[in-house]
């Protein structure tokens, strides 16, 4: 798949959060790719966008992924 066939569904603040979200989506059968700047992960920074990691899914999976992420977020709320 070409990069333009993928869409960002989540913006993680660091690799740990990105891999948690990636695992959540993949456990539901959704293909996932992570998009990040090498320097952010190298230095371990998450300031002013540096170190942010985009969680991408194929466009046809966007609705399913966003629904799953919304459900996960609502379960966290008290």
Image: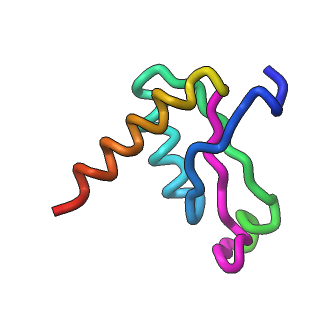
Residue 51 falls left or right of residue 29: right
Residue 60 drawn at (x, y percent):
61, 21
Name above or below for residue 48 compared with residue 71: below
User: Colour mode?
Assistant: rainbow
Residue 51 drawn at (x, y percent):
69, 67
Residue 58 falls left or right of residue 74: right
Identify the residue at the far left of this view: 78
| Quarter residue 31 falls in | top right
Q: Residue at x 57, y 65 (%)?
A: 13
| Quarter residue 9 falls in | top right
Q: Specify the segment rendered in magenta.
A: 44-58
Q: Nearer the viewer, residue 15 or 78?
A: 78
Q: Residue at x 45, y 47 (%)?
A: 20
Q: Residue at x 66, y 36 (%)?
A: 33
Residue 14 drawn at (x, y percent):
59, 63
Identify the residue at the far bottom of this view: 47
**33 in the magenta segment:** no
Q: Which residue is drawn at 48% across and 33% down?
A: 65
**45 in the magenta segment:** yes
| Quarter residue 48 falls in | bottom right
């Amino acid at each position: 798949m070409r990069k333009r066939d993928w869409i960002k569904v989540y913006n993680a603040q660091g690799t740990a959060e990105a891999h948690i979200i990636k695992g959540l989506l993949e456990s539901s059968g959704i293909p996932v790719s992570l998009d990040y700047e090498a320097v952010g992960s190298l230095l371990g920074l998450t300031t002013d966008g540096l170190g942010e990691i985009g969680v991408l899914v194929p466009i046809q999976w966007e609705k399913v992924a966003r629904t799953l992420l919304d459900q996960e977020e609502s379960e966290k709320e008290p």
